[in-house]
Each structure stands twice: as C-alpha cells, then as structure tokens.
Amino acid sequence: MKPVALVPVYNHAATVGAVVQALHQLMLPVILIDDGSNAECATVLDALAATPATSLLRMPENSGKGSAVMAGLREAHARGYSHALQLDADGQHDAEALPTFLDAMYKTPKAVIAGFPCYDASVPASRLLGRYLTHVWVWINTLSLRIRDSMCGLRIYPLARTLLVLDSMPQRSRMEFDTEILVRLDWDGVPICNLPVAVCYPTNGVSHFRPWRDNVRISWMHARLFFGMLRRLPRLIGRHFLSPEHR
C-alpha cells in the first residue's frame, strides 16, 4: 500500500502550511492542488512545493473543489499511489485524528475511510441544519445509514476502485462532489468505514461555501441521486436487505 495526501487549496495562505506540516509528520507525501488561488496563496504554495515530499498541481483557473479533488485523484493514481487521503486546507480538522484514519486504511484497504465531524461550539447553527438535511437524503439514496457524514473534508479513498466509479459518473465540479462520490461508491458496493474527527470553525476562517448557489447545486444533486436510486432499487434492496454482510 502506498498512500498520498491530497490537499485542495483555494486562497488558504494562512492555514495550508500547518496542514502540510501535520501530513509530513506522518511521513506522507503531499500533492497540493491549487484551484486558481490569488497571488498571495500561490506564492505560499510555490514555497511549500519546494520542500521535500511536496508537489504542486496547478489548475488553469478556479473551477471548484470537486474539479480540484478529481484532478488530484487522477494524478495520484497516475503516480502509482494506492490510496489518497483528502484533507481540506482550512485547518478545521484535528490532525490528531489522522493516524487513526491511516490505521483503518491499512486494516480495511478496500474501504473508503470517511470522517464524520464532532463539532465544538464554534459551528454555525445553519451549517448543522444544512448538513442534517443532506444526511437524510443520503440515507434515503443509499437505503442505509452506512454513511454517517458525506460532506466531511477528511477521508481516504482506495484509488483504483474510486477511479472506476469516478470515470462512470457525471463530473461534478464544486461542493456537491464530496457527497455524490460517496453515494456512488456505496452504490458500487465499496465499504464505508466512518471515523470521528474533531472540527472547529476559526473566527477568521476562510469559507468558500456560497449558501444560495451551493445549496441549489446540492439540492439538484440530491434529486439526481434519488432518481438514480430508484433505477437501482431492486439491486439495492437485494444487496442491503437480503445479504447480511451489507446491512
């Protein structure tokens, strides 16, 4: 097994350095994906890319987190890595959880290791409500509770299986990607291992979530997935309710 860390970055100049340092402490090589960051952040990324075990993949323009992650997954696979640990560049996820995620990867190499957030008091109430609505739709669209949280920015993908699913799905470029890829991996029978991670929202943190635009995208995604679930309904029922190992 040969894991690599993927860090999609869009204007996180103040936090990405600490994220990379935490990954290097675990002896993980890092691929930074610059999704059209401004000059300040681009300069920080260039400096990080000059350090050992760090490389930079630069998107031609800002095209969304989904596009950046997909480019990173394909690049990691092309370089011969077996697994990709995706971690957001904003520093919200507790780095102390990373060894547990890697241990789970080695124990269950065919599974997606998906984080589910344990929030402190800094989380906005509107975010909690929005996430809960997404949880409900994911449970409906998978006919299960196997995915605890589909929006967490910390997860580990088994690359070969993920690329097969990725190449067969419509290309989603923005915030909806994290949820859609997990649902489609579950549809394809990939095991999901859920692990907790502490998450905080820094007072001066940078968020690129745009409530109106991104909620419309996410709502449309849930509708698409619902009709996709209906098309797969006989197979999903057979797999999830007749086979004990998939319950």
Image (spheres, grey):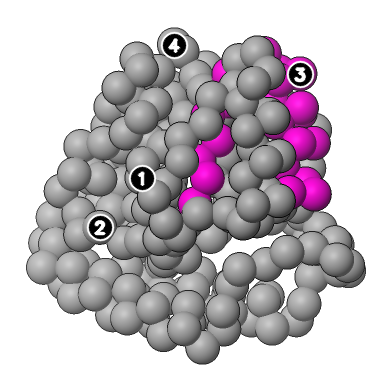
Disc 2 crowd, CA 10 A, few/some/many (<14, 14-19, 20+)? some
Mark 1 or 3 closer to N-term? 3
Q: Secondary structure at mark 2?
A: loop
Residue at the spot x=68%, y=18% of the render?
Answer: 51
Residue found farthest to the bottom? 212
Q: CA distance from mark 3 to mark 4?
A: 18 Å
Give the Cα separation between the discs numbered 1 and 3: 25 Å
Residue at 67%, 76% in the rendered image: 127
Which residue is at the front of the view, 14 or 77? Answer: 14
Q: Residues within 10 Å of mark 3 (few under 14, many from 20)?
A: few
Q: Position of residue 6 (x, y in %)?
A: 53, 35
Residue labelled with disc 2: 171
SS for tag 3? helix
- Name the kind of residue labelled 2 in the image: Gln
Residue assigned mark 1: 70
Image vertical order of residue 76 relative to residue 236, above or below: above
Point out the tag, 4 or 2, that comes first from the N-terminus: 4
Secondary element type, mark 1? helix
User: Residues under labels 3 and 2: Cα distance?
Assistant: 33 Å
Marks 1,2: beta carbons within 8 A: yes
Inspect the image, locate mark 3, and give the three-letter code of the amino acid beneath it: Gln
Task: From the image, tell me which residue sits under label 3.
Answer: 25
According to the picture, the residue beneath numbered tag 4 turns out to be 1
Residue 81 x/y as whole percent? 40, 18
Tag 1: residue type?
Met
Q: Quadrant of the N terminus?
A: top left
The disc labelled 4 sits on which kind of residue? Answer: Met
